Amino acid sequence: DTGVSQDPRHKITKRGQNVTFRCDPISEHNRLYWYRQTLGQGPEFLTYFQNEAQLEKSRLLSDRFSAERPKGSFSTLEIQRTEQGDSAMYLCASSPPPRYGNIQYFGAGTRLSVL
Amino acid sequence: AQSVTQLDSQVPVFEEAPVELRCNYSSSVSVYLFWYVQYPNQGLQLLLKYLSGSTLVKGINGFEAEFNKSQTSFHLRKPSVHISDTAEYFCAVSGGFQKLVFGTGTRLLVSP
């Protein structure tokens, strides 16, 4: 078990470009979460999948953001037409089935810088 | 809806001294409570959790926390800190098998 894996670790892009991040959860974890963390703040929830179904989306997730989890395995988070305000650390977490409690395991994150 | 308040943005302490990081939560339902630690440029690592049962929970690296329902608190404590404990600590709450709601974090600064 190698933990939650996120790729890339760092991404620098120009304003207006599209970016895509990938998250590979711990195997057999059926729930997957995306959070965003800006400097000096705690992580804020973006969206949540149970298997391949996207069950909740935050109001923070504007129309420029889309997330998928095809086949209930890895997930991608895409940001279209990036803005400087999108600069943040994007964290992915996964958790096992409910009988183990809502314990979320986090990846190392993808740090996005929009120039 | 849930919310978390971490009262101290920064806590300086000398090595081998005890420390307490404060966390208060607000929730209209039964909660699960967590403390995570974040080292620079890294993700979050789970320190400890309260799901049910004993209100005193022990975690990794010698940390412990006590769930106090009447005071809606979940303070983190360690009897003797090390330089390596310098990091950002986040308290979080969830109302079930859902998203975590985090506080703004407390930076623990341990000096020799």
Image (tube, coloured by chain):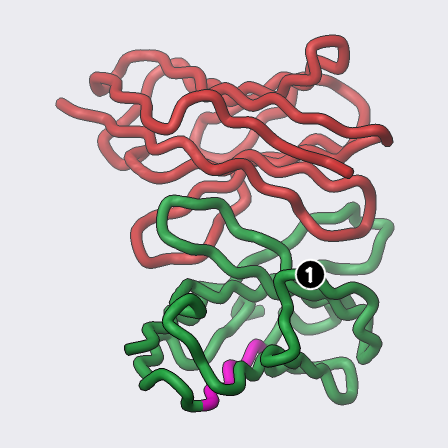
Q: Position of residue B93 (x, y in %)?
A: 68, 37
Q: Is residue B40 left or right of residue B71?
A: left
Chain rendered green: A
Name the main secondary structure of what is drawn in magenta. strand
- Can you say whether A65 is above or below B69 in the image? below
Q: Quadrant of the N terminus of chain A?
A: bottom right
A99 relative to A28, above or below: above
Viewer-side residue, A68 vs B61: A68
What amino acid does circle 1 point to? Answer: Arg
Residue at image location 53% in from the left, 81% down from the top: A79
Q: Which residues are magenta?
A: A18-23
Position of residue B57 relative to residue A108, above or below, is above
Helix, strand, or loop for circle 1? Answer: loop
Q: Residue at the location (70% across, 83% down)? A: A68
Query: Where is residue B73 drawn, in percent x and y?
Result: 64, 17
State the residue position of label 1: A59
Q: Chain of mark 1?
A: A
In the displayed structure image, the side of residue B112 where residue B9 appears, left or right:
right
